Image (cartoon, helix red, strand yellow):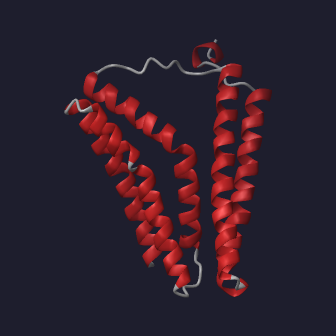
């Protein structure tokens, strides 16, 4: 595994450690401001990954799938970061305070609209990640060194299209409650 691949792994671990410390500080130590501060540090983990990726490419590395995944990771983290933190916050709150978030399960058109909003977040992640990928391709300006970045952009475009089809399918065939579909 190359340096960038290891950095992605380390940044992912750091992302969840910072979130865990933030939630621990917020709920166990009852320090809401300090917990919020720790949760606010998560974008800096992404910034660190971006800097390391850029420096590696600047030093002449041939772009690999790992370099491309760094851009994907950053886009996903920015677009979905708040909802990932909210999910972790809900789970942490439930397990440590035994208070459920009270969010009901979604079915029918409500589920379809929720998934469509999630697809829009995916589109936002794609726009960020693809912009970073295109910027790296432009910055390196050597197709022999950037083929992996182009391939990731193409693959992600296909995944985004499939996700759009899934989102649309929920409007055509709405998700039904198990109690309703069992009858």
Whether residue 135 sits left or right of residue 57 in the image: it is right
- Give the percent coordinates (x, y) of residue 125: 63, 51
Q: Residue 46 or 170: which is nearer the viewer?
A: 46
Q: Across the whole image, how many numbered discs are drawn on residues?
A: 0
Residue 23 makes an appearance in the image = no
Residue that protrudes farthest toward the right in the picture: 172
Name which quarter of the figure residue 21 lies in: top left
> In the drawing, does residue 43 fall left or right of residue 167?
left
Residue 176 drawn at (x, y percent): 66, 20
Q: Report the residue at 70% width, 65% height from top.
A: 153
Q: In which quarter of the image is residue 105?
A: top right
The answer to whether residue 181 shows anywhere in this view is yes
Residue 77 lies left or right of residue 177; in this view the side is left
Residue 145 occupies quadrant: bottom right
Residue at the spot x=72%, y=83% of the render?
143
Q: Taking 123 as reference, is 179 left or right?
A: left
Q: Position of residue 103 (x, y in %)?
A: 49, 20
Quick check: 2 above or below 133? below
Where does residue 89 sit, x and y in percent of width and height?
38, 33
Residue 86, compared with residue 105, is above or below; it is: below
Instruction: Point out the image quarter for the N terminus.
Output: bottom left
Q: Residue at x 64, y 42 (%)?
A: 121
Q: Which residue is drawn at 26% across and 30% down?
A: 27
Quadrant (top left, top right, bottom left, bottom right) of the C terminus: top right
């Amino acid at each position: 595994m190359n340096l960038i691949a290891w950095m992605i792994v380390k940044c992912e671990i750091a992302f969840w450690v910072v979130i865990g410390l933030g939630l621990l500080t917020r709920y166990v130590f009852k320090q809401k401001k300090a917990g919020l501060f720790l949760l606010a540090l998560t974008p800096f983990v992404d910034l660190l990954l971006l800097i390391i990726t850029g420096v590696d490419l600047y030093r002449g590395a041939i772009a690999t799938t790992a370099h491309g995944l760094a851009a994907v990771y950053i886009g996903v983290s920015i677009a979905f970061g708040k909802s990932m933190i909210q999910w972790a916050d809900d789970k942490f709150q439930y397990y440590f305070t035994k208070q459920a978030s009270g969010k009901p399960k979604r079915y029918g058109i409500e589920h379809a609209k929720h998934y469509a909003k999630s697809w829009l977040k995916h589109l936002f992640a794609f726009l960020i990640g693809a912009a970073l990928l295109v910027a790296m391709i432009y910055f390196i300006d050597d197709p022999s060194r950037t083929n992996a970045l182009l391939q990731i952009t193409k693959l992600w475009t296909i995944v985004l299209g499939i996700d759009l089809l899934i989102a649309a399918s929920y409007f055509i065939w709405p998700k039904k409650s198990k109690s309703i579909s069992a009858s």
